Image: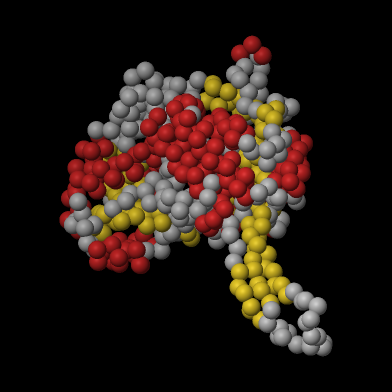
Amino acid sequence: MNAPTSASVLAPTVKLLINGQLVESKTTQWRNVVNPATQEVLARVPFATPEEINLAVSNAKEAFKTWKKTPIGQRARIFLKLQQLIRENMKELAAILTAEQGKTLPDAEGDVFRGLEVVEHAANIGSLQLGELANNVAGGVDTYTLNQPLGVCAGITPFNFPAMIPLWMFPMAIATGNTFVLKPSEQDPMVTMRLCELALEAGVPPGVLNVIHGGEDAVNAICDHPDIKAISFVGSTKVGTHVYNRASLNGKRVQCMMGAKNHAIVMPDCNKEQSLNALAGAAFGAAGQRCMALSVVVLVGEAQKWIPELVAKAKTLKVSGGTEAGTDVGPVVSCAALSRVESLIERGIADGAKLELDGRKPQVAGYDKGNFVGPTIFSGVKPGMSVYDQEIFGPVLCIVAADDIDQAIEFINANPNGNGTAIFTQSGAAARKFQEEIDVGQVGINVPIPVPVPLFSFTGSRASKLGDLGPYGKQVVMFYTQTKTVTARWFDDSTTSHGVNTTISLK
C-alpha cells in the first residue's frame, strides 16, 4: 500500500459509491493506479474501511425493500438508457481503460462493447424472468413459479477486463431485482467507476448499486457479511477457490470463474493462413492477459512444420503503448506482472523447452519505462514445465506436438483447467469428434476465443470454475433469483367439502 507523504503531489482519489453518492473514503490505506506504459500515477484508490463496507451493504439492504417491488418494465428501461449512454461515451471509456490497464484503444473498445452486450440483454429482463404455470395439476389446483430476487448481491472483478466483467455482473443482478455491492480490481478501478456513474445517470436509484475498493480484507468482508446473499467472482484460481470456500461456508450462493490454460488443436487440413492469424491474435492480443487467451497450441501431424511461419507472423506484431496507432501488443498491467512473465520465460528455458521467439526486453520508442514483453514462443513444451503448468498471463505461446486428433484431445483433457478450447480444421467429422469428446466448457470451431454472446452463458468447467451457473446469459437469471413454487386452490361458496384428507394426494 502506498501511503501518501506529500499533499502537494497527490493524484486524484477514486471515490466510493454509497447510497447513490460518490464519497471520499476515510481510510489511511491507499494504492496508486499506474499507467503500465509510462508508470505515471493516474489516481489513488482507497482500501475501504470496515465501516464503509458495512455502510455500503446496509444501504443496499435498505434499497432492496423498494427496488424488488419496482415494476419490471421500469427496471428494463434503465438498461435501455444505460446502453445508450455507454455507446455515447465509448471513446472516453476506452481511453480511461487504456490509460490504467494498458490494452490498445481498439481492444479497450472491444472490452466495453462485450459488456455493453450484457446491458442490452438485461433490458430484456421482462422475458428472461418469466415464471411457469401449469393449470389443473389436480382438481381446481394450479401450480406456478415466481422467480424472485435474493437481496444484496456482490461482485469481485479482475484487472484484465475492467469494463466487461463489471458489466457482466451488476446489470443482470440489478435487472432481476437485487441490489449490488461491487468491488472492482484495485489496480484499474477508474473505468469501472465511470460506468457506475453512467448507471446512476441512467436512473439506477440510490443504494441499488454501491462500489467499495480494497484488497484481501475487502474480499473477506464480502465473503463474511451476513446480509450478502450471493457473490460473483472472476479472477485467479487461488483467490477464487478462497472466495468459494469461505463464502459457501457462510451460506452464500457463489459462482467463481477462475484460471485457465486454453489449448487449440491445429489440424493439417485447416485453412492455414486464417488459422495462423487466429493463433497469433488470440495468444498475443491484450498482451496475453485474457483468461480466454490461447496459450497452448497443439500442432497435429504435418501442421508441426508451420512453426517458422507462426514465428514470422508473431514478429510482425507491433509492441507499443496502447494509444499508439497500429499497436498490437500493449504492456502487461504492472511491474510485478512483468517480472513474473520474464521469470517464467527463464524457467521455460531451464526446463528444456525450445525458445523459438524471445520477446523479453523489447525496444519500445517513447516508452522506456513501460512493462513490455513482446510475443514469445516456446516449442517442445511438455507437462511438468512451469510454462505449461502455470497460467502465465503474458504474451507467451507454448507449442505441443501430437500425432493425431485422438492424442491431441487426450492431451487437452489431461489438463486440469476447462475454460476454453478451439480446433482449426476444415473437417466436419474432426470438429464434431472434438466438440463431443473434449472436456472443456467453451469450444471454438475455427474460432480462437469462444466466449459466447449473452444470449448464451459463459460456461467454463472443471478447475476453471466453481459453482454451477455462468456469470451472464440465461444461467445468471437463475443465479440471481430464487424460485418460489406456488400451489393454489380457490373455493367458491358452492364447493362441497370432501372431508378430511390425511393423504399426500391432492383430491
User: From the viewer's perspective, is 434 left or right of 370?
Assistant: left
Q: Is residue 460 visible?
A: no
Give how far across and how far down residue 256 sits, in percent. Answer: 56, 52
Count of marks placed on residues: 0
| The furthest residue to the top | 8
The relative height of residue 178 versus residue 110 in the rendered view (above or below) is below
Q: Is residue 133 visible?
A: yes
The relative height of residue 406 versus residue 160 in the rendered view (above or below) is below
At 54% across and 56% down in the image, what residue appears?
127
User: From the viewer's perspective, is 64 left or right of 342?
Assistant: right
At 61% across and 13% down in the image, what residue appears?
9
At 19% across and 56% down in the image, what residue appears?
268
Q: Quadrant of the C terminus?
A: bottom right
In this rendered view, identify the residue nearer to me: 435 or 417: 435
Give how far across and how far down residue 284 sits, in percent. Answer: 34, 39
User: From the viewer's perspective, is 56 left or right of 336?
Assistant: right
Q: Quadrant of the N terminus?
A: top right
At 82% across and 88% down in the image, what residue appears?
499
Give how far across and how far down residue 473 sits, in percent. Answer: 50, 53
Give how far across and how far down residue 491 sits, in percent. Answer: 77, 76
User: From the viewer's perspective, is 284 left or right of 68?
Assistant: left
Q: State the image quarter where residue 367 is shown.
A: top left
Q: State the image quarter where residue 133 is shown.
A: bottom right
Name the colouring of the figure.
Answer: secondary structure
